[in-house]
């Protein structure tokens, strides 16, 4: 087996590195040190997503794999990065007729703990869900960086091109989909803005979703998010984004808070937050398109790619680059 170079150390590259390290493969990581979207991500994992309260059919499988994967990382780096959390999904009056049945008889039922009215939002129906978690993405990346640096496996520099006799795995995130790739990706990358606030009076231990979201991150701090913007793809926080995020903060938390950080990043999206992996030339592979659910899917996607490279296991059809090209058209 040829040695492997991983380009990029966001969630995709870091998970791939752990998968290779656990299997004793020879590899190195090349990362520019520029902040990717992983440094902005809230790391939320929850079973019921989107305006239509959808439960992905592979959620349970991916969640179990992600939890075990991050726990194994924790046992090496000796720091907690995975935090199980109860989720409270709020349904407004106008949503209840359409969406409440999904929690009573539909696919979301297995995740429901309780349906009730919370004093804080008396006009809503509140649905307490199990299966939620938060990955502390920044801690995961920082501890991974320290660990792989200590083994001499991390090179902090810009990637300048594949080396002969080496397999390259491109994990560049949105940067790799928007600029400088040999493939004209049909991406749907979306800018997102997010707040970190300090709010001792909120005393909230659950992740609150519906009309945006809010999640406790410890020390009376919370992340509040997030915006979606498909046209202005830069990583600058905006005044419009701030107004929107503050309305979520007031609605889900309360008026009493101070803003610690207002941040922005670009989610790498190829097809509805489904990642894509495979060969773009004989010795160059890609793992990208983690979308808004990278914390959940990166352990699975990186394992599939690594098993494909080391053991010849066919890539899962949902992940395969070939299948992606079959749906969007192969580039010339
Ligand atoms: C506001 C916001 C909120 C989010 N919330 C969540 C959430 O709650 N849950 C969730 O699961 N996901 C969330 N996401 C999505 C999550 O951030 C992504 O799924 C994930 O971070 C993508 O990881 P990545 O490794 O593909 O890309 P990135 O994190 O962008 O990493 C790419 C890395 O590659 C490096 N790189 C790129 N090109 C080169 C090069 N040529 N040479 C060397 N290095 C290079 C970059 O420096 C970077 O370190 C959110 C995203 C945003 C913007």
Image (cartoon, rainbow, N blue to C red):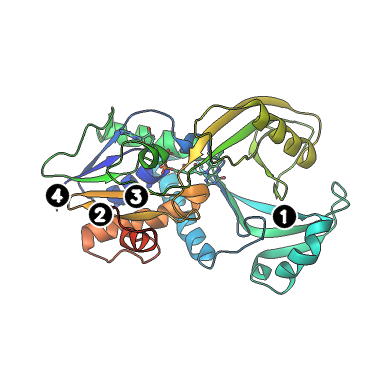
> Foreground residue, 178 or 282?
178
In the picture, the disc for residue 89 is 1
Name the quadrant containing residue 247: top right
Q: Distance between the residues labelled 4 and 1?
A: 48 Å
Which residue is nearer to you in this view: 303 or 80? 303
Q: Is mark 2 on a helix, strand or loop?
A: strand
Residue at the spot 60% in from the left edge and 64% down from the top edge = 55
Cα distance between the residues tagged 1 and 2: 39 Å
Q: In the picture provided, is 296 more to the left or to the right than 257?
A: left
- Which numbered marker is on residue 2? 4
Mark 3 nearby-residue class (10 Å; few <14, some 14–19, many ≥20): many
- Indicate yes or no: mark 1 CB to ligand 1 under 8 Å: no
Would you place residue 163 above or below residue 133 in this image? above
User: Of marks 3 and 4, which one's residue comes earlier in the chain?
Assistant: 4
Task: Indicate left or right for 2 with 123 as reference.
Answer: left
SS under mark 3: strand
N-terminal of the pair, mark 1 or mark 3, is 1
Image position of 85 (left or right of 264): right
């Amino acid at each position: 087996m040829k040695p492997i170079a991983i380009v990029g150390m966001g969630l995709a590259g870091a998970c791939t590195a752990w998968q290779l390290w656990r299997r004793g493969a020879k590899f190195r990581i090349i990362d520019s040190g520029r902040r990717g979207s992983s440094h902005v991500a809230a790391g939320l994992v929850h079973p019921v997503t989107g305006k239509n309260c959808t439960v992905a059919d592979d959620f349970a499988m991916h969640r179990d794999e992600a939890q075990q994967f991050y726990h194994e990382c924790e046992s090496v780096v000796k720091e907690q990065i995975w935090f199980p959390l109860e989720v409270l999904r709020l349904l407004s009056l106008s949503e209840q007729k359409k969406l409440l049945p999904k929690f009573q008889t539909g696919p979301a039922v297995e995740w429901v703990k309780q349906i009730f009215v919370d004093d804080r939002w008396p006009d809503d129906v509140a649905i307490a869900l199990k299966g939620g978690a938060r990955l502390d993405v920044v801690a995961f990346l920082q501890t991974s960086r320290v660990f792989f640096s200590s083994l001499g496996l991390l090179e902090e520099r810009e990637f300048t091109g594949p080396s002969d006799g080496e397999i390259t795995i491109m994990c560049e995130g949105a940067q790799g989909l928007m600029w400088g790739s040999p493939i004209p990706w049909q991406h749907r990358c979306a800018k997102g803005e997010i707040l970190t606030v300090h709010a001792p009076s909120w005393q909230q231990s659950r992740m609150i979703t519906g009309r945006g979201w809010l999640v406790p991150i410890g020390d009376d701090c919370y992340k509040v998010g997030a915006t979606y913007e498909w046209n202005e793809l830069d990583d600058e926080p905006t005044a419009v984004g701030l107004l929107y995020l503050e309305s979520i903060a007031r609605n889900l938390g309360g008026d009493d808070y101070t803003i610690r950080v207002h941040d922005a990043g670009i989610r790498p999206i190829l097809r509805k937050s489904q990642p894509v992996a495979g060969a773009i030339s004989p010795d160059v592979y890609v793992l990208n398109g983690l979308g808004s659910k990278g914390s959940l899917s990166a352990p699975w996607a990186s394992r599939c790619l690594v098993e494909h490279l080391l053991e010849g296991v066919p890539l899962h059809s949902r992940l395969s680059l070939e299948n992606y090209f079959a749906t969007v058209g192969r580039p010339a």
